[in-house]
Amino acid sequence: MRQNPVTALAFVLIVALPAAPATAQVFDWVPENRTGGKLLLTGGVSTIEGSGGGGLATWAVTTGYGAQDGIGGNVHATYINLPDYELRSWGVAAAFWDRVEVSVARQEFDTGATGAALGLGSGFTFTQDIIGLKVKLVGDAVYGQDTWLPQIAVGLQHKSNDQGAVISAVGGQDDEGTEYYIAATKLLLAESLLVSGTVRFTDANQTGLLGFGGDRNDDLEPQFEGSIGYLLNRNLAVGAEYRTKPDNLGFAGEDDWFDIYAAWAVNRHLSVTAAYVDLGSIATFEDQRGLYLSLQVGF
């Protein structure tokens, strides 16, 4: 299996942050004026892979509401109900001084009764762990209103799947892999409009849930993730996302993903996102369309 230094790199970044002063109360090391500096929803919500963005697409913004001298973070739980499958995701993410984001997420892809038809057994579940790192390079999506320069960030996600034998049997080349991306996000406050685009270099099958690489292709290829959002008011945003996918496995074609979403910030600590998702064909089962629901709690 391929080895990658993502875990060590994330650890080094956390250790390198300034040490917090001793205190008798939990969270006293986070000064009040260093949290909650961003506008509502401008840190995005948690993607199914744990990074800050939309539901399906990663954005260049860092998660949470910490501004340039602040710290932000969240926990999330996401559920996607499809005709033949269920996808569950949960995780934690933290951002430091609106510059570096670290995230950890776990996904469970439950085949339910479909598992028996696939020869895996009813309720067979693929589990994938994801460690993410994002670094902002230039721009500011919120405060850069006097320039057309978007906020630009680079990042990586290391993914590890627990079903190596099944992945190999269907033609996958590996049960773990690392993806790299560059993202650009622009918020036009006067128009209440957010636009974001990401290029992800990946060989993942169904975002890694069916492994990495295959009999058709085993190379990292650029794929596009796009988001558009309209702020109906300061607490509610609606929009759509589109995500292209590689097609590596000969036994089953892979379709691009699409969603139409609404994200509601109840307050600075709680948000709810609901969406209609179209995930196309998954493991020979067509028309995987259904409901996406995600809850996020943070600061």
Image: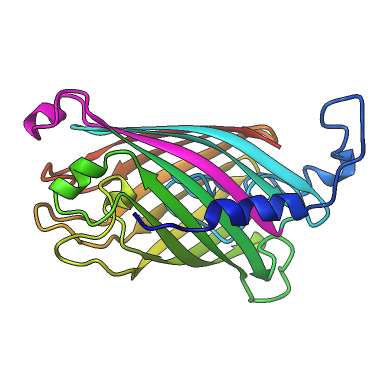
Relative to 265, is 258 above or below? below
Magenta range: 99-125
Left or right of 100? Residue 68 is right
Position above or below: 247 against 266: below
Q: Is residue 295 above or below residue 66?
A: above
Q: Residue at x 14, y 48 (%)?
A: 170
Nearer-the-camera pick, 280 or 247: 247
Give the image quarter of residue 88: top left
**Does the segment drawn in magenta span residue 106?**
yes
Figure quadrant of the C terminus:
top right
**156 or 12: nearer the viewer:** 12
Image side of residue 232 versus residue 35, left or right: left
246 relative position to 297: left or right: left
Colouring of the image: rainbow
- Whether residue 144 is visible here, answered yes or no, is yes
Q: Quadrant of residue 12?
A: bottom right
Residue 170 inside the magenta-drawn segment: no
User: What is the tally of numbered marks visible in this picture?
Assistant: 0
Of 219 and 151, nearer the camera is 219
Q: Quadrant of residue 268?
A: top right
User: Residue at (25%, 34%) from the top-left corner?
Assistant: 82
Residue at 64% x, 76% y is: 149
Asked whether residue 38 is in view, the answer is: no
- Residue shown at 84%/51% (left/top)? 18
Which of these two is toward me, 167 or 154? Answer: 167
Quarter of the image where the N terminus is located: bottom left
Q: Position of residue 163 (x, y in %)?
A: 27, 39
Q: Position of residue 48 (x, y in %)?
A: 43, 43
Q: Is residue 202 left or right of residue 28?
A: left
Residue 128 lies, in percent from the top left, at: 38, 40
